[in-house]
Image (cartoon, coloured by chain):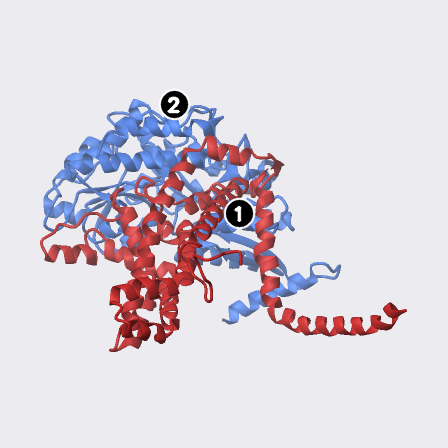
Amino acid sequence: MRKNTTVIAGSLAAFLLAGSVSARAEEVLRFATWDSDESLAIQQAIAKKFEEKHPGVKVQVEPYADGYDQKLVAAFGAGSPPDVMYMWNFPQYYTSLMPLDDLIARDAAEIKPDDIPQGLMNTTRVEGKTYGMPSGFTTQVVFYNKDMFKAAGVEEPKEGWTWDDLRAKAAKFRDKDNKVYGFAVDAKPDPYDFEQFLWSNGTKYISDDGKTIDGYMNSDAAAEVLDMFGDMARKEEAATLHLGDDTSGDTLFKGGKIAMFQSAMWSKAGIDAAGFGYGVAPLPKFGDKPAHSALGVSAMSIAKDAKQPDLAWEFVKFFSSPEAVAMRTNDLPVRTSVAEEKGMTSDPVYKPFFDILATSDIETHAFLKNRNWGKVQDNLARAIEATMIDQGNAKAHLDDAVKRSQRFLK
Amino acid sequence: MTIAATAPAVVQKRRSAFSRHLTAYLFISPWILGFLFFTLGPLLFSLTMSFHDWPVVGERTFVGFDNYRTMLLEDPQFWESLWITVKFAAIYVPFNIVMSFLIALMLHHATFASGFFRTAFYLPSVISGVALVTIWSWIYSREYGLLNFMLSLVGVDGPNWLGDPGLAIVAIIIASLWGFGGTMLILLTGLKAIPKELYEAATVSGVPGWAQMLFITLPMLGPMLLFTFITSIIAAFQQLTIALLMTKGGPLGSTYFFAMYIYDNAFKYFDMGYAAAGSWVMFLIVLVLSLLVMRWSSAWVYYEGEVKGGDRNA
């Protein structure tokens, strides 16, 4: 309560003094984040550190949580965007964001851009310009329950395993009476993450010039991926998530109802707390094609009309500095040096996250290629869901999605 | 000269009339100001928006009727979601009114614990949308839901209520009907307002119960029924909360209501102009439906002291 009062008093003071020439009591920097709970606490701690280093600066952390996109767009619409914000939807906002390339080049000695993997930087670029600095990231992996593997006498996954391997293992866990499955497939996956399976099978949602989806989104390779998941559901190798039921894969995995669970860093803290032995395997490959992962990146952007652009840039730089990056335990360090220093690149739990990062810098997420992707994506999501309900028939559903989406590509 | 002589008196009269009215206007001014600033203002503003390409971030451009043209001619989602809403309304509205009427009738005649039942039936209406959705999600859950558990007791293997494209809309209609308390309360008030003498006179004259219902209760309730009819139609067309939270428009878009289509255009695609155009289409549809109902109602709604069948122009 007292903390709140100071924040309010601080912002009030800043507001009152904003117009005057006299020295300000405090400079307030507004920072919007989509995180909550523990991740939010970490960011508040980083912001505190920044305040210590910059006396007279107050960072006002604004956690928009679930309604992040709605609240951010409202703030922009009302002409009072936060100075610094988490950003993922660059194509939607980049005209209102500050390009950072010149600043990065200017402060290269301090930032050491080579320490940040290229794949991560790629997610913040629109039309060749950089609009965000990565501060944390995650790739996708498969968590598996070691206790269940032991009890069932199934060999644990190995590096370089394939979807066929996963399916063979999963089939051995099915227990009808106890509602136990080997794996879980999602009828409503986030299409952003789902594209990794198409990449891994040698295709993508949309051409690199962002103009063609026919022959990409509905290619045979894409249909093969969807049909495979549908088939896994039909043969009961996997439970189907989000088909009229909101039970999450996290809940099933933590409850010992599925033996393997494909997810990312955001599931790890919960699994740690569940208290059983678990291992982390890389994403399976399709045959001998290399596996690619979606990149979930928390990037920091600055509003074009930020009142204190220099201070905002200092803050963004600090968020991706080794000191701040090392504090983020709920996602992965964007700096290779920090990851190595913490021994994460050789730790069996973290290694798969970093290994796949190395092979995930050649593809660009679809939404960065076309401004209307959000609308196309909804048709695609429906095709995925339809395939999971039919437990197959992917080609027809994808063709339909392509047909319905053509008008958005003009 | 006469004008000059009478003028002050008129002014005084006017002034007193004005000051008398001023008090009244002051009393209703909170509503009037609220209406002007928070209803009429945004309404007209959204009309302007609907003629623009209006992204939240970036340039606005005037596009004339383009939004409306695209919506009506090129966007299959518009027709699909409109059709879902019409289906929903066609089932929800009559059920809502008939159910409310029957329960109101029972409560009206209840001799035992009527206060308790009135509260019990009205209670769901005061529950906020989110809580209502949470409760019904539990009831409908396939594996752990109350409904399927009860079905299993009588040996029925319950369906996947929210996961089946054919059933999800039924599930939403049932959940929506649960909030019938408001309509019920209006009809109950209407029933209580019907003079007892009418029934007494009818009973004395040997008019049977069903005829009393047909010739006394229903006609006397006419204005109330009309009101609930129109508000139910409006509520049906604006259905958003339950679908948004319980099914997210799925499965396979089978519960993608028109209001959700507007919501997505605005807050998911940030296409404010297109969304505003959608709102205006909805407004026009509801307006036309309401006018049709009003016109039709003159055949069956009787207002106090009104005489029908004679010379209407008299």
Badge 2 marks a residue whose secondary structure is: loop
Residue A119 visible in the displayed image: no
Q: Dot 2, how many residues are within 10 Å of its Cα: few (below 14), some (14-19), or many (20+)?
A: some
User: Would you name the residue on which mark 2 appears?
Assistant: A214
Left or right: A350, with B233 as reference point: left
The x and y percentages for residue A282 are: 28, 37
- The residue lying at 40 percent from left, 44 percent from top is A339
The x and y percentages for residue A221 are: 29, 24
Amino acid type, mark 2: Asp
Q: Colour of chain B?
A: red
Q: Are marks 1 and 2 on the same chain?
A: yes
Amino acid type, mark 1: Val
Residue A183, above or below B141: above
Q: State the residue in front, A30 or A185.
A: A185
How many numbered marks are there? 2
Residue B95 lies in what quarter of the image? bottom left
Residue A170, above or below A47: above
Q: CA distance from mark 1 to mark 2?
A: 31 Å
Residue B279 visible in the displayed image: yes
- Asked if disc 1 and disc 2 are in contact, CB closer than 8 Å, the reply is no
Q: Colour of chain A?
A: blue
Left or right: A311, with B70 as reference point: right
User: Would you name the residue on which mark 1 appears?
Assistant: A73
> Disc 1 is attached to a residue of which chain?
A
- The residue lying at 41 percent from left, 53 percent from top is B299
